[in-house]
Each structure stands twice: as C-alpha cells, then as structure tokens.
Image (cartoon, grey):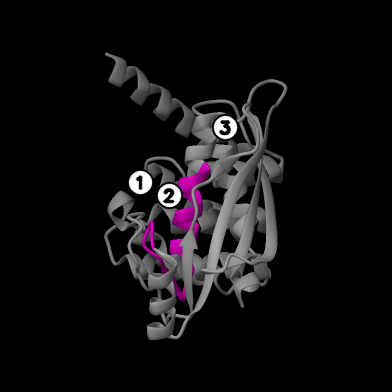
Amino acid sequence: MLAQTHAAAADARQDYLLRLLGESSQFRVRAQAAVSLGSVDPNSKVVDGLIEALADDHPAVRAAAANSLGRLGDRRALEKLQRAARDREAPVSKAASAAIARLERSGGGGGAAGRASASGAARPQGPARFYVAIGKTAAKSKQVPAAAVAEANRAVRDEVEGIAGVVVAPVGERPAQAKAALRKRKLTGYFIESSVTSVESKPGGGSRVAVSVIVATYPGRDMRAILSGAATAFAGGNSTAQAAAAAVRSALRKLPQAMR
C-alpha cells in the first residue's frame, strides 16, 4: 500500500509538471517544469511532453526541454533534437547538441538504461582531454537537508560524466596514481568540489537551492574557478532535491569553458 501511495504521488507530480509545461502562460514556469521533468522516471508521456516543448515560443523553455531529454536518455527524441540543434537561439542549439551527444553516447533504447553511469570508474567521453576527479558534495550549514546534498552530489557526477572529452577519475585515487594516469593519457587534471550553500523555502511551497562549485587542479588542488548556480522547484514530491539538481546543472553549464 505504501509503494502504491508513493507511485500515485509521483504520477500526480508528473501530471502537474506536464500541465504546467503545456498550459502555463509564464515562460519561467514552463521552463522550470521542463527542468524538473528531467529528473522524473522516464516514460512516453514525459518524453512526448518535452518533445512538444522543443517547439515552445520561448527559447528558455526549448533549451530546458532539450537538456531534460538528454538526461532522460530516450533516443526517440533524437530526430526532434537534431532539428532543435539548428535553432536560431544559441542556448537552444547548444542544449540540443549536448543532448544529442549524450543520447548517442548512451547507445541504449532509453530510460534509466540509457543514462550515464555514476559508478565512479574512469570512463572516456569522446576524444579525451580532461581527467576529472569529483569530490563529495558538502553542506554549508546544518540547515541544509541531507536529501539536497545527496541529489546535488548525484547531479554533479551525472553532469561531469556527460561532458565530452572528460575521463572521470576513480573514487579514492591516490595522488601518485593520478599523476601516473595524467602522464600516460597526456590529459589535463581537474578536481571538482561542490557544496550546497543555501536552501530557502518559498511561500506556497517549493524550495530554492543555491550551490557553489570549485574547479581546482588535480592532484594539486589549486583553485582555478568558482561556479555558482541556483534554482527553484515547485511544491510536490521532493522539491528540495529537484531544486538542488537543477542548481547544479545551472552551475556546471560553464564547466567545459572553465576547463578549457
């Protein structure tokens, strides 16, 4: 009975987000709904709704839909994403191109099986350029819920693994091992350290989460850049975790540029 209750709640939240995506008159609401749908259990209804959103009037919604389709890993979206990759708006074409690359790397039919693995083992993505170690996400205060930290940690690894040219270093690698790997592969090493800096409850429900990401050398850990991001998720389901994942994606949009 408890499992059925959770499933019903998840279905209700999904339907609510799809309704916002398709019917809201505010583009920010539609865009946030598209972002949130990228973290639900993938199914044909969600994928179809996001595909339709690729034709939305506002580029922010189109870009968010493309990004979420890449995360869900359903290759049925490839044809529409290829069209979106020719969008006149640069953020849309960039998001669609990244989603296409992610789907083509997955090689699967879609759903969870098509997503990038978060096993922590080294895994090349395209022509290798960077060797990236990922630290465990921290909380800046005791008020930050554990669920937000856990989801941010998962999102960091998921996003980094999806960047073309990145080889993810094994968890717990020693400095000597890192240096040997860098010499052998002739790559540039980086260390990603993330933290959830604040969680704010919004009037009427929902949460706003802010994150900070430090990009440092690896294995030396000399800081090279600080990236920040924030996002708000609507009430329903675990809005704090959803906002944490979206905030991480916002922060890491500039990670490829920072590493270059």
Going 49% across and 46% down the picture, which residue do you hit?
153
Q: Is residue 192 magenta?
A: no
Which x, y percent locates residue 106?
33, 65
Going 32% across and 55% down the picture, which residue do you hit?
119
- Residue type at mark 1? Ser
Q: Report the magenta residues as a range.
A: 152-173
Q: Nearer the viewer, mark 3 or mark 2?
A: 3
- Residue type at mark 3? Thr
- Residue type at mark 2? Asp
- Work out whether mark 3 precedes mark 2 in sequence or the reverse, and give the earlier one: 2
Residue, disc 1? 44
Relative placement, left or right, of 19 versus 226 is left
Image quadrant where residue 205 sits: top right
Q: Is residue 171 magenta?
A: yes
Residue 47 visible here: yes
- Indicate the quadrant containing the C terminus: top left, top right, bottom left or bottom right: bottom right
Residue, disc 2? 48
Relative placement, left or right, of 125 versus 63 is left
Query: Are the two marked residues, 1 and 2, in contact with CB atoms closer than 8 angstroms?
Result: yes
Which x, y percent locates residue 222?
64, 67
For mark 1, does the 10 Å Cα neighbourhood hold few (<14), some (14 to 19), or many (20 or more) residues?
A: few
> Which of these two is toward me, 200 or 103?
200
Residue, disc 3? 240
